[in-house]
Amino acid sequence: METMTSAAQYYLAGDLGGTKTNLAIFSPARGPHLPVVEATFASGAYPNLTSLVQQFLEQVKLPVQHACFGVAGPVVGGGATITNLPWQLEEGALAQELGLVTVTLLNDLVAGAYAIPNLALTDLHTLAPGAPTPNGALAVIAPGTGLGEAFLLHDGARYRAYPSEGGHADFAPGNDFEAGLLHYLRGAFGHVSWERVCSGKGIPNIYEYLKVIDFAEEPAWLTAAFANAADPTPLIVTAALQHEKPCMLCRATLNTFVSILGAEAGNLALKVLATGGLYLGGGIPPRILPLLQGEQFMQAFLHKGRFTELLGRVPVHVILNPKAALLGAACYGLALE
């Protein structure tokens, strides 16, 4: 660990989630890929973020002046709340309580987006190399528990990330089967967003529709497993990816998910004209990489009529680095120097 020096400038970066919080301190000399010190905390063990960060700073004893936190929730007017936590966050109050010059809150997907220009080749798996435009817009779509979207624009000096709530826009079916899925989900939810069918929450919705139309029979072992599971999504994904004997109902669910993800990824790439590249973030894409490498995803991504040729030039990558949000918060903070 580095020792305190008056000449050193340190930045605190964090990735705040409902279950765990990752904190790390970075310095310009070492850059965003090599933290000076890093630690993970159980978020629920602390009454607020201030107490957690104070404990960390007391342990590391480094002269931090600035902090940037990626937050699992919307950031509005410098304030935010975290899903599944009672923490109320406000930039000015946090800076005062922690004795820092500045505190910046970013939506966690925006924080992850800031990491994209700084990712190493080992952080990525390329689905389509494309022909990127230098300094072209970048787009990120991240299916995890929900569906996050963001984009980056180059200002002549560096990329800047911008939030989006495109995951809550209206789901548009691309074929008759998806039209039936939309009709079914309208009965359950009224409004059907892309997140309803393209996220960890959406995978069970697709699965239930396939059961309703009697696509295939649910195996008895899976029925029993569902009865003891708080979240059916990991079971569906695991059963779909079994090499020797995948569950056909689960495999069809993931095939549908992959096609829908490809379609919305293509939509996002068109909306922000992501000639620099489209990046798949979130926890699900690395888990289902074998299916994303098949033809289905790219077929749906490219299926845009007269703009198929343009999308064919857009590089498509899967982000493999599970700490992209922490890296992005560090990149944002270090760029403020």
Image: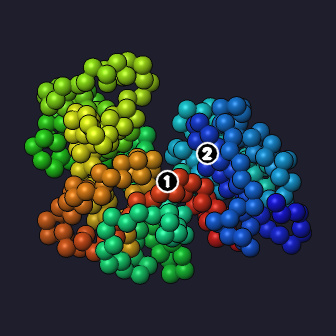
Give whichever of 269, 252 is nearer the camera: 252
Q: Secondary structure at mark 1?
A: helix
Q: Quadrant of the N terminus?
A: bottom right
Extreme residue in the front direction: 244
Residue at 84% x, 58% y: name it.
62
Is residue 105 visible to us here? no
Disc assigned to residue 22: none
Task: Choose top left, top right, bottom left or bottom right for residue 126.
Answer: bottom left
Q: Position of residue 290 (x, y in %)?
A: 33, 52
Q: Residue furthest left?
A: 176
Residue at 44%, 24% in the rendered image: 230
Q: Label 2, on which residue?
A: 16
322 is higher (above) or lower (below) than 55? below
Q: Tell me the CA gap for discs 2 and 1.
A: 11 Å
Q: Front-most of 282 and 295?
A: 295
Residue 128 visible in the shown view: yes
State the residue position of label 1. Answer: 109
Q: Position of residue 35 (x, y in %)?
A: 70, 61
- Image spot of residue 169 (x, y percent): 31, 47
Q: Report if the CB atoms under discs 2 and 1 are less than 8 Å apart.
A: no
Q: Give the amino acid type for the residue marked by disc 2 in the picture.
A: Leu
Q: Earlier in the sequence, mark 2 or mark 1?
A: 2
Displayed quadrant of residue 8: bottom right
Q: Secondary structure at mark 2?
A: strand
Residue occupying the point 32% across, 40% down: 242
10 Å crowding of disc 1: few (<14), some (14-19), many (20+)? many
Residue in the picture at 89% in, 67% down:
5
- In the rendered image of this protein, does residue 245 appear above or below residue 275? above
Quadrant for the C terminus in the image: bottom right
Q: How is the image coloured?
A: rainbow
